[in-house]
Image: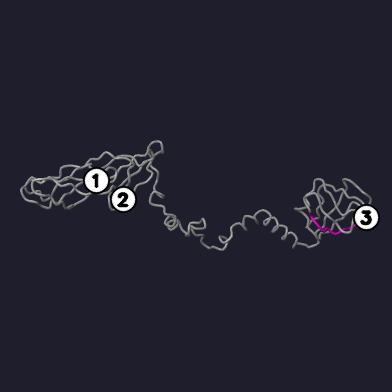
């Protein structure tokens, strides 16, 4: 590889320090290289302190000179170039690689170490706890009411919008109600499929399949259900207590944030 001659050097008689101007010793030389001084003599490079300062051995034997020409000759052949390239990588990335610690030994970095814990997208979403919204296409611009999350569970279906709107839909078939004779009975709370932050507006349609004697599904009952879910009322105008089978579809619209 070629000698390095960029810039000039200042050498002082009897001193081991060589000071460069316009030089880059640290990137182009190392201890063990040969330095040909402005006096034409050869010296061993013993230390590279910086881009502009290095030390030689023996001490400079020529007359003191400023802005003198020089040459640096590699004494290790192509091994030096490889070592220099490796040193550049270590200088740039060594601290970063060292900071990885145990992560550097992982084929698959677990979530506990800041990774995804998997080697494919589907498993990564699972280990990170991401739901279906993670891969859902955004419908419209955010300001126009983009869908943030949509899903379904045992309590029904729901859709959350960017503006905070939440729509919940629930349906059921063959829901039994025990209704005393000549009175009404209120159901327990049937949870919404997603949580509202305040009581939503509700609407429904429903009917009773064994409505003998005029039993009907009257209405959604707010009661103390609040933001938790639905309540329903069955009316039994007959003189006989009965278990009535209700079917309904209900929708609630409110806010999730």
Does the magenta run of residues contain 51? Answer: no
Q: Residues within 10 Å of mark 3 (few under 14, many from 20)?
A: some
Give the CA separation, mark 1 to mark 3.
99 Å
Q: Which residue is mark 2?
A: 152
Q: Nearer the viewer, mark 2 or mark 1?
A: 1
Q: Secondary structure at mark 1?
A: strand
On residue 61, which mark appears? 3
Query: Residue sitting at 18 percent across and 49 percent down?
Result: 247
Quarter of the image for the N terminus: give it: bottom right
Q: In the shown orientation, is residue 132 left or right of residue 187?
A: right
Give the CA separation, mark 2 to mark 1.
17 Å
Residue 95 placement (x, y as % from top left): 64, 55
Query: Residue sitting at 35 percent across and 43 percent down?
Result: 160
Mark toward the start of the polypeptide (1 vs 3): 3
Q: Which residue is mark 1?
A: 230
Q: Secondary structure at mark 3?
A: loop
Query: Residue sitting at 39 percent across and 52 percent down?
Result: 131
**Residue numbers of the magenta segment:** 40-48
On residue 174, which mark appears? none
The quarter of the picture where residue 144 lies is top left
Residue 176 placement (x, y as % from top left): 16, 53
Residue 91 placement (x, y as % from top left): 69, 55
């Amino acid at each position: 590889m070629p000698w390095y001659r960029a810039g000039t050097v200042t050498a002082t008689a009897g001193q081991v320090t060589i000071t460069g101007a316009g030089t880059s010793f640290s990137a182009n030389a190392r201890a063990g290289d040969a330095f040909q001084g402005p006096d034409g003599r050869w010296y061993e490079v013993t230390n590279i302190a910086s881009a502009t300062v290095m030390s030689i051995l023996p001490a400079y034997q020529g007359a003191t000179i400023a802005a003198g020409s020089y040459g640096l000759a590699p004494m290790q052949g192509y091994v030096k170039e490889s070592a220099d390239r490796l040193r550049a990588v270590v200088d740039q990335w060594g601290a970063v690689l060292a900071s990885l610690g145990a992560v550097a030994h992982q084929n698959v970095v677990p979530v506990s170490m800041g990774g995804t814990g998997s080697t494919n997208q589907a498993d990564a979403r699972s280990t990170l706890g991401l739901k279906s919204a993670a891969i859902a296409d955004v419908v419209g611009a955010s300001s126009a009411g983009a869908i943030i999350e949509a899903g379904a569970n045992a309590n029904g279906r729901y859709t959350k919008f960017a503006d905070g709107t939440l729509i919940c839909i629930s349906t059921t078939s063959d829901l039994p109600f025990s209704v005393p004779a000549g009175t009404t009975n209120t159901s327990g709370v049937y949870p919404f499929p997603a949580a509202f932050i305040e009581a939503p507006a509700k609407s429904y349609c429903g009917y009773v399949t064994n409505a003998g004697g005029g039993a009907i599904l009257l209405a959604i009952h707010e009661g103390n259900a609040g933001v938790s879910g639905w309540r329903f009322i069955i009316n039994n105008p007959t003189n006989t207590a009965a278990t009535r089978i209700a079917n309904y579809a209900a929708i609630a619209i409110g806010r999730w944030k």
